[in-house]
Amino acid sequence: MSLRRRLGSLFKSQSELDLTDGSIPRSLFFLSFPIVITNLLQVGYNLADTFWLGQYSTEALAAISLGFPLVYLFISLGLGLTVAGSVLVAQHTGADQPEQAEYAASQTVIFTLLAGLVLGTLGFQFVAELLGVFGAEPAVLTLATDYMEVISLGLPFLFGFTVFIALMRGAGDTVTPMLVMFGTVVLNVALDPLLIFGVGPLPELGVEGAAIATVFARGSAMVVGLWLMFRGAHGIQIHLRQMIPDLAYSKKLLRIGVPASVENTGRAISVNAVLVIVTLFSTPVVAAFGVGIRVFSMIFMPAIAIDRGVEAMTGQNIGAGRQDRVVATNRFAAKTSFLILSALGVITFLFAPEIIGVFDDSPSVVAEGATFLRWIAPTFGFVGILRAYSGGFRGAGKTLTAAAIAVLLFGFIRLPIAYVASQGLVPIDGWFFAEPNPTGIWFAFAVSGIIAAVVAAGWFERGGWRGGDLTERSPTEADSEAEPGDEPTAVGDD
């Protein structure tokens, strides 16, 4: 079999996929698999920074460990708009309303770029104060500030490529963003060592060099993404005349997007808040936490890809009036995600020290990082369930529900347990400790994931996803598109 034919068996173009009919496993696989690759490539940015800065110095590695949650926070604040755009494009596409889909995409692009500009400006002005909350060692704090100032100025570029990925996904095209991402990751990987260590006429920039490489590469990806959307040959098309900010339409974007931002910001704030607790311990513990979070970013890629695939499939099927496929898609996705992440959890548990050692071979970092991974690895499958149903809620327009679950997980479960357990406030032999110990933080990650998965599954199965049609059709009109007596589509039907 030729290479081209082999690739064709793994990837399908938008024209080859019908998300509202046929086999659910087939549609979800061909929609989600390119997202897995795209997200792995996206993690490549962070992994490249982590690897090269780990070779540079432990302080530099700790600095980006300190800065990464703040990067995530900034991106999460603007991510709600991209989710809103993706859901609107998906539902209008499913309802066969191309003009409305294009207008939604055009408005989402302009508001997302404006959000990136505003947040980037604010971030640059206050990054030192924000990082100062963590109380890290002065040398690490200075390096983290240098890194985050560059990232803040580049936020519009980071937002620009993120909205391209989201809108194409809502239209059912996940292959094109994958190809664009591949080229820019190659660019970033090539630039990282040159700018970090300095080669020839290029000065040694350390952590600033890593930030510049990331911003330049993602800026290139944004330019390519916007060009493709203006052409309209793939996925969704945008129009310059429709990019004049429509304040009335912005209310619709915000109504959907603000809860989605809360969901993602909840995750980011949680990581930042947990980092405050982590910084009560030594620099090796901070470095181990940073490496562990990056490892999670890679391991959770399949679950996140299924999450995004479910979001698009749920949106298009609601737009098409196929309520039966909404339930079947989410159930299949939850089971599949649980099995995949559970398998990855076994591998992670067995090879935890070796995984941490790839990024930092300091014995203290390897020991603490391995402990972190081994506490949470057995619960990876539950994270998969949580992400699958969260994607279903968002695709159904129930972004507030997804946000409520995230706030429950991070604000009311993980954070309090992390603090109480790690500081020895409730000494129970075998679980918590009679004196401060970072293992209490790792325990909090494990137990919160299980509880949130149970809540998400129960909420969805009780019908919490219903009533989220955003296509502005009447309920009677939407319901009439589903044939009377429809039963949930068997996931293996073709």
Image (spheres, rainbow, N blue to C red):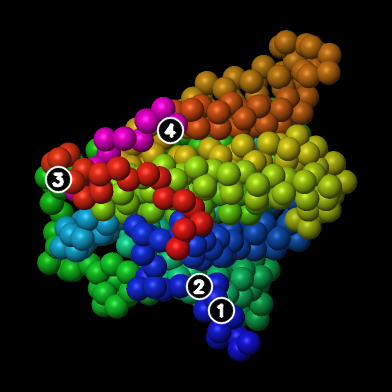
Which badge, 3 or 1, comes first in the chain's sequence? 1
Identify the amino acid type marked 3: Glu
Identify the amino acid type marked 2: Phe
Which badge, 4 or 2, comes first in the chain's sequence? 2
Specify few, some or many for label 3: CA neighbours under 10 Å numbering under 14, 14-19, or 20 or more.
few
- Cβ atoms at labels 1 and 2 below 8 Å apart: yes
Which badge, 1 or 4, comes first in the chain's sequence? 1
Distance from Cα at disc 3 to Cα at disc 2: 34 Å
- Which residue does the numbered mark 2 point to in the structure image? 11
Among all residues in the image, which is located at the extreme right? Answer: 363
Segment tinted magenta in the rendering: 460-472
Identify the amino acid type marked 4: Phe
Which badge, 3 or 4, comes first in the chain's sequence? 4
x and y, in percent, of residue 408 in the image: 49, 25
Specify few, some or many for label 1: CA neighbours under 10 Å numbering under 14, 14-19, or 20 or more.
few
Q: Nearer the viewer, mark 3 or mark 4?
A: 3
Q: Is residue 461 left or right of residue 257?
A: right
